[in-house]
Amino acid sequence: MAGQRITTRNARFQQWHALLANRNKRKRQNEFLVQGVRPITMAVEHGWTIRALLYDASRPLSRWAEELLRGISTDRVAMAPELLAELGERADGPPEVLAVVEMRPDELSRIRVHDAFLGVLFDRPTQPGNIGSIIRSADAFGADGLIVTGHAADVYDPKSVRATTGSLFALPVVRSPSHHEVAEWLSKESAEGRPVAVIGTDEHGEADADRFDLTQPVLLLIGNETSGLSTSWRELCDHVLNIPMSGSASSLNASNAASVILYETARQRRLAARG
């Protein structure tokens, strides 16, 4: 199998290694690392650009890996296992294959608004794992896209990418600097006949989530893990809902709250579809 071979920490290896911890390098190079059969397969199936495939030079490859390497026209790099393990951030040995994947553009137009629109927005998340978990839940419950706003953890952080288990490649995920760009996008969609209700979530919300109509086109807002929704987002909300709880906990963590409200939205829509 023709391709480059890397056995030392050369300049190209260092370039990929920087993608693990340096978000500025990821942004500058416009690429990130992906591992695992399902995530890499989904990236390919959903048409993401694979810039390079890095594979373990020391062992026979599985049928999946062989077909992947033959089926994609991209750089194929045979790598020393200890270097591949370093890029895979794994103590139990190297992954069989790593993919270097090109980022998709941060354009809100990638998220299509329609009559049954369901969008999610995560305001200033601090934990990349929470971003990944919310992407996974949003994909599972039929959302049309996720927006991450403000000074936040990075969607393409390896912890976030791993937590999505491949859903990142199936769901449009867009980073937006602030509420201004999102408000402008929503205003434009409304002017074109596609209004969206902006629904916040908070323990002191005005109504219980299961008693509010979530079958209309909605953008669900999930606040920062520590401070909740910002004042700017609260002012843009059409409604703020709470999740009824009966235990001693006063609130749920961000990814759990997102999963609950997404499930409730999907539940209401299934019932409505049945008539």
Image (tube, rainbow, N blue to C red):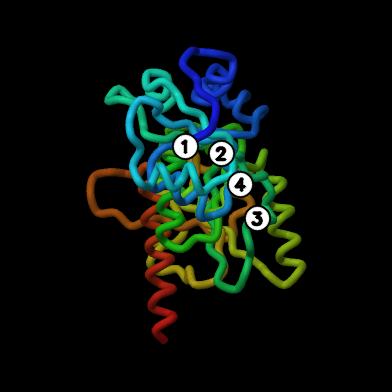
Q: Earlier in the sequence, mark 4 or mark 3?
A: 3
Indicate the position of residue 104 as horizontal and vertical percent values: 63, 45
* Residue at point 55%, 63% (across, down): 218
What residue is rendered at 23% in x and 45% in y?
248
**Label 2, label 1: how far apart the Cα atoms are:** 7 Å
Mark 1 Cα shell of 10 Å, populated few (<14), some (14-19), many (≥20): many
Q: Position of residue 192 (x, y in %)?
A: 76, 69
Residue drawn 56% across the image and 66% down it: 117
Query: In the structure shown, which secondary structural element does the residue marked by tag 3 occupy?
Result: helix
Q: CA distance from mark 3 to mark 1?
A: 22 Å
Label drawn at residue 110: 3
Which mark identifies residue 174?
Answer: 4
Q: Is residue 47 visible?
A: yes
Q: Earlier in the sequence, mark 2 or mark 1?
A: 1
Residue position for label 2: 101
Mark 2 and mark 3 lie on one chain; the one further toward the N terminus is 2
Instruction: Check the image and name the residue furthest to the bottom.
Output: 275
Residue toward you, 219 or 94: 94
Judge from the rendering whether residue 12 lies leftward or rightward of residue 132; answer left or right. right
Query: Are the residues at dot 2 and dot 1 in contact (C-beta closer than 8 Å)?
Result: yes
Mark 3 closeness class: few <14, some 14–19, many ≥20 residues within 10 Å:
some
Numbered mark located on residue 34 in the image? 1
Mark 3 vs mark 1, foreground winner is: 1
User: In the figure, 48 relative to 33: above or below?
Assistant: below
* Residue 203 picture location, percent across and down: 40, 49
Q: Amino acid at mark 1?
A: Val
Callout in the foreground (2, 3): 2
**Secondary element at image label 2:** strand
Q: Residue 196, percent across and down?
A: 62, 65
For marks 4 and 1, the one nearer the N-term is 1
